[in-house]
């Protein structure tokens, strides 16, 4: 298996409840390394660009408002098979369907306020990392 990098966001519902450390503990316990991390707050340009793929979906406006509603923690995670592994560690989009022990099962509030984002492919991970980090901010 290849060493990969994936892009992660700890979403506003989680930072609001002071869960950054608890979520990072789950990430690290799963064998993923946090090789870049910063706390930021997005405006409309960043939130709309990031979730642009969903712009025709009925929940798009709410999703963009939610993502701007408080601080987020953007991260680069590194490890074997990191993209698929982090999707497993996050659990299903809707916490009601997420497996026990996953971040979304343990922490998410709803299908929208679901605590974390993770890239869905290696190609998208590269794009998302490039949108959010300069090369010198990533230290493996
Ligand atoms: P993410 O891209 O954030 O990692 P995901 O890949 O599991 O999540 P997507 O289908 O890409 O799920 O949806 C992106 C985000 O949009 C979800 O994480 C969630 O915050 C929100 N979302 C998805 N479906 C709904 C819905 N039916 N109602 C409200 N919000 C939704
Ligand atoms: Mg997605």
Image (tube, grey):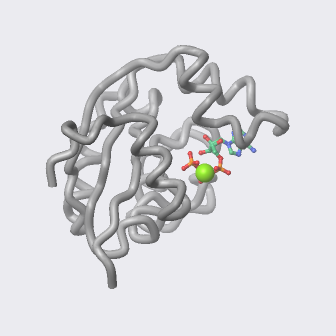
Total label count?
0
Residue positioned 46% across, 70% down in the render: 84
Along the line of sight, which residue is nearer the eye, 68 or 105?
Answer: 68
Quadrant in the picture for the C terminus: bottom left
Quadrant in the picture for the N terminus: bottom left
Q: Is residue 55 above or below residue 127?
A: above
Residue positioned 25% across, 38% down in the render: 37
- Residue farthest toward the bottom in the current orientation of the protein: 1
Residue positioned 53% across, 63% down in the render: 121
Position of residue 15 measured from the top left corner of the image (x, y, whole percent) = 36, 28
Question: In the figure, residue 48 lies in which quadrant?
Answer: top right
- In this rendering, position of residue 135 left or right of residue 17: left
- In this rendering, position of residue 65 left or right of residue 118: right
Question: In the figure, residue 2 lies in which quadrant?
Answer: bottom left
- In this rendering, position of residue 108 left or right of residue 14: right
Question: In the figure, residue 78 lies in which quadrant?
Answer: bottom left
Residue positioned 59% across, 24% down in the render: 66
Along the line of sight, which residue is nearer the eye, 35 or 91?
Answer: 35
Position of residue 33 measured from the top left corner of the image (x, y, whole percent) = 20, 58
Position of residue 51 measured from the top left corner of the image (x, y, whole percent) = 64, 36
């Amino acid at each position: 298996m290849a060493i990969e990098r994936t892009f992660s966001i700890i979403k506003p519902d989680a930072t609001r409840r002071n869960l950054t450390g608890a979520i990072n503990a789950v990430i690290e316990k799963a064998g993923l390394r946090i090789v870049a991390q910063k706390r930021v707050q997005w405006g409309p340009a960043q939130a709309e660009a990031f979730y642009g793929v969903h712009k025709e979906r009925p929940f798009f406006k709410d999703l963009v408002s939610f993502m701007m509603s408080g601080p987020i923690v953007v991260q680069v995670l590194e490890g074997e098979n990191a993209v698929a592994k982090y999707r497993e560690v996050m659990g299903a989009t809707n916490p009601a369907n997420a497996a026990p022990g996953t971040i979304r099962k343990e922490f998410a509030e709803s299908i929208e306020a679901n605590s974390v984002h993770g890239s869905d492919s290696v190609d998208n991970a590269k794009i998302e990392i490039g949108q959010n980090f300069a090369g010198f901010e990533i230290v493996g």
